[in-house]
Structures are given as C-alpha cells and as structure tokens.
Amino acid sequence: MQLQGKKIIALGERDGIQGSAIAQCTASAGAEVVLEVTHCFV
Amino acid sequence: MQQMTAQPVIRGVRFFLAHTPGLVRYGSKPSRDIDREPAVVDTLQAHLRGYADAVAYPPNQAFLGAIHPDTLGSLPTPWFRHTGCGERWAPHGEIMSEEEFYGWLKIADAFNLVSLEAGFAASIRPALAAHPLCTPADLEQLGTGVSQAELDARLAGDVPDLPIFLRDGSRIGCFHAAHEVDATLAADVLLENLACKTTAVLAMRTLLAQEHIDPLAIPYVLNSGEEAVGDRYQRGGGNLAKAVAEMSGCQAATGVDIKGFCCGPLHALAVAGGLVSARVFPHVVVVGGCALSKLGMKYRGHVQHDQPILEDVLAAVAILVSGDDGASPRLRLDSLGRHTVAAGPSQKAIFQQLVSEPLQRLGLGFGDIDKYATELHNPEVTEPAGSGNVPLLNYRVIAGLAAMRKEITPAQVPDFVAAHGMPGFSPTQGHIASAVPFLGHAVDGLRCGDLQRVLLLAKGSLFLGRMTQMADGVSLLLERNG
C-alpha cells in the first residue's frame, strides 16, 4: 500500500497494536497522521 | 540494627464475588445508554441471570478456586449454559447474593449514605447473622431500615438519591449524595466507592479469618483499586486502604492506595514485597476492591447474541505478603519487569521488558515458567462485543517471543500457549482481571502442586486518563519455596 501523502487515522488497542505504534509506522512511510488514539476494550 | 533482608512470600490469597444484577444499570455504559433511552432498563432486565446461575457459572467457579482454569478448556461452550450446580463457598472465596451484599453495603457505610427499606432490612438480617464474617457490631450497623414513604421523599428531593433495585426491579433502598453540587460526592460516585470498599473488606476478612491471622498483626495495607475516593478539592485523594483496614479489624494498621490502572495490584505487590524484604513490616496486605462502573460494559454484545449479561458480578482480592515461612511461594523481587518510558508502545517492546528481559536476567528460558498469568479476561464476556480473546492475544505474543529466541519453533506456538497459558476466566473488573485471578491457583500449585514458577504480568492503560499516550506494565516471578 502506498502511504506517501495519505492522511491517517490511527486507531489502536492496548492488547493489540497501539495507536502510537500505527502512527509511527505510517508516518515513517510518508503518511500524515491526523488522529492517533488508543483504546482499552476491557 | 538488623542488616539482613527478608525473603517475601505470598502467604495467602482470597477473592470475593458479589452477584449484583440489580446494579448493572449503574455500570457506566448501561447508565449512559439509559439516560439517552430509558427503555434500555427493560432490555437489561430481560437478560439478567439469577443467583444460582451466577454461582454455577464455570468461570466464576474457576475465579473462586473450585475448579482449575485449565478445566474450562475441556468444558462445552457456551459456559453460561452450565446452570444450576455450584457452591457459594469455594477454596479461594465466596460468591454472595445481591440481597446480602446490599446488607454489607449498609454495614460498611460510615456516613449514612445507604438507606434500606425496613422490610428488606429485616428479611436479610438472618442470612447476615449466619454469615461467618458478620459480627454483632455489623448487625447493629445494619439497622432497622426506613419506610417506603421516606424513600419516596428522599428520591423526590432537590438532590435526588439513587434508588437501589433488585434484579426483578423491586426497589429496596436508596443511596444518598453527600453534597448538593460536588460531582465527586454524587450518589453514583459514592456508590462505586462504597462498593469498592465493601468488596475489598469482605475479601480481606476472608483472608485473615481463613489464614488464621490476627487482624492486629497487620501493620500496613495497600489498596490497588481504581476508584477515585476524594472530594472536589482532591479528587482521587484516597485513602481506601485505611478504610478497608478499619473495617477489617486491623486497629494497628495504616496504609495507602497505589494506583496504576490494571497493573496497580502488581505494583502494589512489588511495593509490599519491598517493605517486607526491608523488614519495615512483617506483613503487608494488598487489596483490590471492585469496579462497579464496569458492570454491563459489554451488555450490548450480550443482548445482541441473546445471551445473559455476564458482567453482573463485583470482584475483589486480598493478598497477604509476609516474611519467608519456608512453605509459601517466594516473591522474587529480583525478577521485577518494568515497562519503562523509553521502551515504546509496541506489544513486542512491552513483552520484551515484562518477560524476555527478566527471564534473561534470571538465566531462565520461556519454558521454565510453568504458567504465565497475564490479562485473564473471560472471552465469553469480550468476544460477543467484538473485543476478541484477550488472554489468547497476550499468550500468542509471549509464545512469539519464545520462537524469536529459538526456544520453540513457530509451529509449536499453539502447544506453548496451551501448556503455559490458560483460558480467560476473570470478570472484566478493571484491575482485578490482570494476573491476580490466577494467584490462588498459583499459590496452591507452588505450595503443594506441580508448579515450580509462575510469572505474573499486567498492563495498565494509562492513556485513558489523557495525561500520557503511554501504557504501563509490570511483571513479577513467583517460585516454589525450598
């Protein structure tokens, strides 16, 4: 997937992949993270 | 001055469950939905199960030590269809009915916040009097109750009280606010706090009575619950630990609250172990009361799947940390794993700090740990709501790290998970569900079973408080004594 120049909403979860991890990965691929949030579902 | 440190051990653990279907409406999620759509109450009520079914529910029986968690894997699912047989009293604690629990809520009430209807108070008195932990002073505190007319008047007041219901919808009392405008002393907040205190007290009284510990021998109590006890000038100031100590007869004790979301209890265990090791105190009790706000948190998924609302119990734990008695499992303080600020947020980074690094430090392999006790949420609660099987997710990460270290092959990951993990069985009661539900089984297995080592690990969702984006985590090793 080409992420360069894309806007990203990073929705993470505590026991899966956290929002900040998604944000770091996608930002390093050239995306712009417009929202980053992590939830706990338990 | 004595220089030698002491070896801390987990001398005893007890749990407490209260089946409180009538309080499900006051869980955070149901209460917000009811505010928007009052008919939600009827939906809830149609899906609340009875006390006998909650007692017989296999995950509750595993939580209280009547069956081992591994047994759950061989039981037909759904587990909630196992109804009608089960014991209230189990090796690690009891599950109490809502009627009796409301009585204990009144007994634990130091500020006349609870009013029970007179007929109801009279009806529960014999059961409370027969309870092995109930004293004459407790029965006096129960009182004789108030009239329905008085309840009507209170509920119609300028600062409305919160009506208290049974599962069948009958009103049996009310809960008062302690201030006209202070949101931290509102009736719903105080109900959460008093429920947390009451459940923690019942777990602690059970622990002290069954371990034959004189309450006067307890000098220090650490509360690890998440309830923010305080008023408008010091929201969350605490100190619930001392309130629990007071009501548990620990006249020589004081204490403090240690908070860390779901990993609060493990932080508290580490601190308790440190205090015992340094010979500051011979005994420290770590308690964690219930999380009433979590009742019915995933009710929508349960209703959608036409299953009972399973988040209908309040849970608490009490753990006695003492100096080495030569028999109880050792709390290895040199094993302490910490998810540090610098580690970053990925699951791999967290588990490396909580599992890989401590094992390496101790010269142990992943397979040297008989059981990993991590997030132990009951999947029958979480999966219908789309939240997945949380324990399984965590065990797969641990097994993946073992594979990365070449201790197992990728193909052996499922076998590793089955052997060193366990099915989730804990109520989704906040801090209670992380690692500590296995402690009773761990102590049994390490003291006289076939366990040699158990690693406790828990994670806390600090980001929920909006002060940091970070999570937290702690791990501790328990090992067989002698």
Image (spheres, helix red, strand yellow):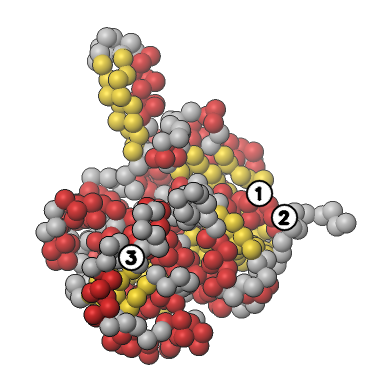
Mark 3 — residue? B313
Decide if residue B192 is in sight here.
no
SS at mark 2 in the image: helix
SS at mark 1 in the image: strand
Q: CA distance from mark 3 to mark 1?
A: 33 Å
Q: Image quadrant of residue B340?
A: top right
Labels 3 and 1 positioned on one and the same chain? yes
In front: B214, or B373?
B214
Q: Residue B39 in the image: x percent, y percent? A: 11, 59
Residue type, label 2: Ser
Q: CA distance from mark 3 to mark 2?
A: 35 Å
Report the residue that reaches farthest toward the front.
Answer: B158
Label 2: chain? B
Answer left or right for B361 relative to B466: right
Q: Are marks 3 and 1 in contact (CB under 8 Å)?
A: no
Earlier residue among tags 1 and 2: 2
Could you tell me which quadrant the C terminus of chain B lies in?
bottom right
Mark 2 — residue? B277
In front: B337, or B165?
B165
